Image: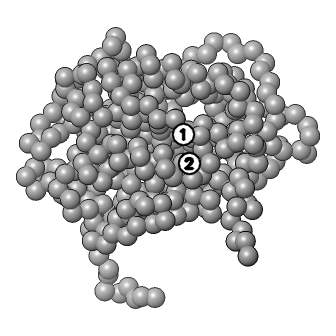
């Protein structure tokens, strides 16, 4: 195992994870002794997980949610109609909200040791990317929605984008606040074009560190084969109300998401390392491809006392409705010039 430190002070792990304190972020999270799993009990607030909508991912829930007849909304055009890249030259980068859940009031939910490392590292790199970072710890659902509604009601005219990160336990289509579960589309809908016109045509980024089920991915061993060798800008236009969203999940639907109790979750470790190293150089989809590579290649669960959870793998899942290239270009290019 090789560990190095980048200029932000974040430890970067570039080898198979050998620490034995790996846990999942399922709502019935297995401890060192196993048990629970995604199907183990749970605490619900009137929503039936067996309903047909529960089998849909968050984006499917968002896209199929009934809005009724929509009026003809309009919003200020933040960039030219056929621009290749998003306009990232506004006065501000924008808000970044981090909802960090460590302890829960739901009896079946274990505390998420290591999540504070994720929160601190993510806040640090987002500030370096010029975001205004707001962190919230162990919010009950009522308070979480109040913070979301407050952010959506702000005027984002002078902002490039908005970012929301949620670190918690989860199940397919659901995530946990401190006191109960909620559907992820309850968050997205506050920022659609008709609900938040000042963000219309701007990137809306969501990073979700949580399980999406209780299935395990044992991976597959890749072996080299013997035969292989080395070797019209001013004209108005319409966009869909769900355009310009990007949702990066730590794992694919139906599967566990892993978290190390001392170093943080695999996904957030990788995301923070890539944002620190390449956040202002690479576009977001290229960067997230390298995040997926880090998680897929460099990590493997180490729980020898729980054989069924041992040597498991994980792959993030990126859902994008972005319509342009997104790059966090420097808000003040002159700041990087060396004075002599």
Q: Check the image and report above or below for 137 versus 271.
A: above
Q: Are marks 1 and 2 in contact (CB under 8 Å)?
A: yes
Q: Residue at x 42, y 88 (%)?
A: 230
Element under disc 2: helix
Element under disc 1: strand
- Whichever of callouts 1 and 2 sits on the residue coming sooner in the sequence is 2
What label sits on residue 127 in the rendered view? 2
Q: Residue at x 64, y 27 (%)?
A: 192
Q: Residue at x 21, y 33 (%)?
A: 110
Judging depth in this view, the residue of 215 and 248 nearest the camera is: 248
Q: Position of residue 221 (x, y in %)?
A: 26, 68
Q: Quadrant of the C terminus?
A: bottom right
The residue lying furthest to the front in this view is 340
Q: Check disc 1: other Cα within 10 Å, few if <14, some if 14-19, many if 20+.
A: some
Q: Position of residue 122 (x, y in %)?
A: 46, 48
Q: Is residue 174 left or right of residue 300?
A: right
* Res. 93 in view: yes
Colour convention of the picture: one colour
Q: Position of residue 145 (x, y in %)?
A: 48, 20
Q: Check disc 2: other Cα within 10 Å, few if <14, some if 14-19, many if 20+.
A: few
Q: Position of residue 310 (x, y in %)?
A: 16, 55
């Amino acid at each position: 195992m090789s560990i190095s430190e980048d200029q932000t002070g974040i430890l970067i792990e570039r080898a198979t994870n050998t620490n034995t304190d790996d846990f999942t972020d399922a709502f019935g999270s297995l401890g060192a002794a196993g048990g629970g799993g995604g199907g183990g009990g749970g605490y619900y607030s009137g929503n039936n997980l067996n309903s047909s909508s529960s089998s849909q991912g968050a984006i499917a829930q968002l896209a199929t949610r009934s809005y009724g007849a929509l009026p003809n909304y309009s919003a200020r055009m933040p960039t030219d109609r056929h621009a290749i890249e998003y306009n990232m030259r506004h006065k501000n980068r924008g808000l970044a909200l981090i909802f960090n859940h460590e302890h829960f009031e739901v009896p079946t939910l274990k505390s998420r040791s290591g999540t504070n490392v994720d929160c601190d590292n993510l806040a640090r790199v987002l500030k370096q990317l010029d975001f205004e970072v707001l962190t919230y710890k162990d919010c009950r659902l009522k308070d979480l929605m109040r913070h979301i509604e407050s952010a959506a009601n702000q005027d984002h005219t002078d902002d490039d984008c908005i970012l929301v990160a949620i670190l918690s336990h989860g199940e397919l289509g659901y995530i946990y606040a401190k006191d109960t579960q909620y559907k992820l589309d309850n968050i997205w809908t506050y920022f659609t074009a008709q609900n938040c016109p000042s963000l219309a045509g701007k990137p809306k980024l969501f990073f979700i560190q949580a399980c999406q089920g209780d299935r395990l991915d044992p991976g597959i061993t890749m072996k080299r084969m013997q035969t292989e060798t080395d070797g019209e800008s001013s004209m108005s236009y319409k966009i869909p109300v769900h355009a310009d969203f990007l949702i990066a999940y730590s794992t694919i639907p139906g599967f566990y998401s892993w978290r190390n109790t001392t170093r943080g979750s695999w996904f957030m470790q990788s995301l923070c390392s890539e944002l620190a190293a390449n956040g202002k150089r690479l576009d977001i989809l290229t960067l997230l491809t390298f995040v997926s590579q880090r998680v897929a290649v460099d990590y493997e669960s180490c729980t020898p006392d729980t054989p069924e959870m041992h040597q498991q793998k994980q792959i993030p899942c990126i859902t994008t409705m972005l319509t342009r290239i997104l790059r966090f270009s420097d808000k003040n290019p002159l700041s990087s010039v060396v004075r002599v």
